[in-house]
Amino acid sequence: MPDECLAALRARFGDRCSTVLSVREQHGRDESPFTHVPPPAAVVFAESTQDVADAVRLASASRVPVIPYGAGSSLEGHLLAVHGGLSLDVSRMARIVATHAEDMTITVQPGVTRTAVNRALEGKGLFFPVDPGADASLGGMCATRASGTNAVRYGTMRDNVLALEVVTAGGDVIRTGTRARKSSAGYDLTRLMIGSEGTLGVITEITLRLHPLPESVAAATCSFAGIAPAVRTAMAIIQAGIPIARCELIDTHTVRMVNAHSRLTLPEQPMLLMEFHGSATDVADQARLTEALALEQGGEAFAWTTTPEERTRLWTARHNAYFAAVHAYPGRRIISTDTCVPISRLADCLLGSAAEAEATGLPHYLLGHVGDGNFHFGYVIDPENTDDWRVAEALNQTLVRRALALGGTCSGEHGIGLHKMRFLVEEAGDGAIAMMRAIKQALDPLGIMNPGKIFEI
């Protein structure tokens, strides 16, 4: 960062522009396995759209890279300053701008987290369903096109964002979309920004689609002798048209770590965790139909509950699975896969990959939103051990190529970041990558917006 740029940022932002090493280091790491990337040159804490516009404009004048930063929960290295520059922290932009309960929409700043949205909706009979597990910021969830456990019924961020306010690479402020439920007016710039990972602009305001709170909610668990019958059950549930809200698979390794971390006593076998939404009658019917399908595949100890405390305890344990693995292996990092395949090919993709992971002896775990064909292996590595890296990356490469051959994708919800750039080329092809580069060049001609992510500039 040139001295004149840093001086201009300090003049504009005062003590909200920091070059303190500890602050820079905090903004130079995420939950990805990359541990040796230098921190950004400076951090600016934005508190308004005007702050973001001014910071981007000053950075652009000196061709300084700008890396948007929210909650820091990225798994693919999105936040890392691989070309140096400015980390633009929007976590203080955490205001609920407007709630329109009658239209089932809410407009928020990008630093608002998903749990804060649902707290703000208490008593209104509405909720925001996209739940990636971590209490991520909504700006980051938009940037990575996040989804999570509820996607099988409620869709991803792509389906639940109506409009955005975005600061462009030149520091201009634009709006995309409206609060209307549909539009055919021009290019769909909202969808272009969803999943752009900060490479096309900085999201400063988001209008979200809300959903009615279900009258009744039930959570269910069912254990299986192996992964195969659990996967077949998940496929049968979807193919039978049961409107399940959540359908999660966790393997024996995950159950063991979750039990230790969350002080549970779940049977240490592969398990489906499920949730049903609807009227009391609908929920009961869905649970009974699901139980019948599970029993056909040898499912054991099928149990369901509508008690909020039990449901919360169960899903909190599931959401903490990643951190349970981190705590089970102190000092290690997780390389997380993120493939998604058509539901009919789920067993073909998942079972072969599970056998390959077991054969290596590398510590790992498996969990997935198998209701929509998305699953994650977590390979637990010593970041200083080159053999661990080699084995984990080889497993990941084989898994991704298997998923692509079956009509799937290298990233169901985590995004590309640093880790999956080579897989994106294999998935999309040279022509599509060239079109992405052309869009990037048109919207960010100086290449300052989160450079080195999605593809090299």
Image (spheres, rainbow, N blue to C red):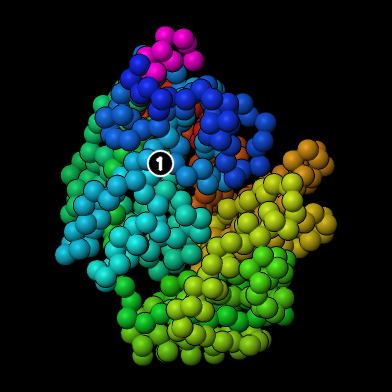
Residue closer to the observer: 286 or 118: 118
The picture places residue 163, in percent across and down from the top left corner, at: 25, 47
Q: Residue sitting at 20 percent across and 41 percent down?
A: 186
Asked if residue 322 is among those painted magenta in the image, a careful observer would answer no
Left/right placement of residue 72 relative to residue 405 reads left
Q: Residue sitting at 54 percent across and 25 percent down?
A: 20
Q: Indicate whether 146 appears above or below 90.
A: below
Mark 1 lies on residue: 91
The picture places residue 28, in percent across and down from the top left corner, at: 56, 32
Tell me the quarter of the picture where residue 39 sits. top right
Residue type (three-letter) at the residue carrying disc 1: Ser
Residue range highlighted in magenta:
1-10
Left/right placement of residue 12 relative to residue 73 reads left
Q: Main secondary structure of the magenta part?
A: helix
Tell me the quarter of the picture where residue 326 sits. bottom right
Q: Is mark 1 on a helix, strand or loop?
A: loop
Q: Residue sitting at 58 percent across and 30 percent down?
A: 22
